[in-house]
Amino acid sequence: MAKYTGPSNKLYRNFGVTDLSNRKLVSSLRQNASGQHGAVRKKLSDYAIHLKEKQKIRLTYLLSEKQFARYYHEASRRKGVTGTVLLQLLESRLDNLLFRTGFAITRRQARQIVGHAHVLVNGKRVDIPSYLLKPGDVITFKAGSSEFIKTVLSSIDLALAPAWITIDRDNLKLSFDRIPDREELDPELKEQLVIEYYSK
């Protein structure tokens, strides 16, 4: 079975995901691994360290193994540092943009908003959460979605908005201005370990 249907928080704890895609849960969850011996410190092999980091990034962005491998191969094909390009691709996803800007409380909710066809990119309806945005793309919402989006927006803090995105809160509009630099992305993600994992 490709889709995991068990408790998500168990996976997050096992692989050290701190984002959890849910701002409300981050501070309340235990940080050690799940299970009876989860708090016991174990010496991990090099392979286990690489695997854990790969799973950590994959779960942070809510991707399947197949999806994540595709992003890696696409990043390795493009110019630039493969690890940085990989993170930039993940950050350019439409569902991630909604989450980063506070137009969705969780990444799961962001995927649902896109999947239910509430989102327009450059005036055209897009219902694919993995849609990759390009610099200059403008994201708006269809007319019937305004009240729902405004309800979600009431809790966002614009001070935390990413520097590479312009937010027009009054008009419910986002502008994807540019690809983020590595220094602007999560410093806890060690993408080089992922590159080493796939290079073996």
Image (cartoon, grey):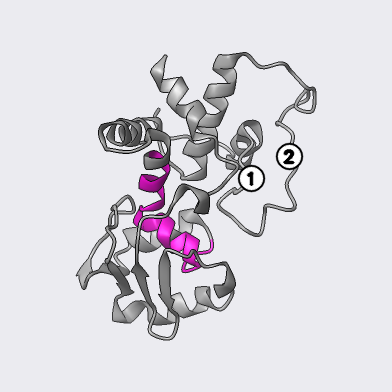
In terms of image quadrants, where is residue 112? bottom left
Q: Locate the N terminus by quadrant.
A: top left
Which of the marked residues, 2 or 1, is nearer the chain's N terminus? 1
Instruction: Look at mark 2 in the image and give the residue it sits on.
Output: 31
Relative height, residue 96 to residue 188 (above, below)? below
Amino acid type at mark 1: Thr
Q: Which residue is at the far bottom?
A: 170
Query: Residue at the spot x=46%, y=21% of the render?
Result: 197
Q: Using the image, tell me which numbered label, if any, was put on residue 111.
A: none
Dots 2 and 1: beta carbons under 8 Å? yes
Helix, strand or loop under label 2:
loop
Query: Residue at the spot x=75%, y=52% of the render?
Result: 28
- Check disc 2: other Cα within 10 Å, few if <14, some if 14-19, many if 20+: some
Relative height, residue 137 to residue 15 (above, below)? below
Give the Cα distance between marks 2 and 1.
8 Å
Relative height, residue 62 to residue 146 (above, below)? above
Helix, strand or loop under label 1:
loop
Q: Using the image, tell me which numbered label, if any, was put on residue 18.
A: 1
- Please name whichever residue, 39 or 158, is drawn nearer the observer in this view of the structure: 158
In terms of image quadrants, where is residue 96? bottom left
In terms of image quadrants, where is residue 22? bottom right
Amino acid type at mark 2: Gln
Residues rendered magenta in the picture: 86-105
- Please name whichever residue, 72 or 27, is drawn nearer the observer in this view of the structure: 72
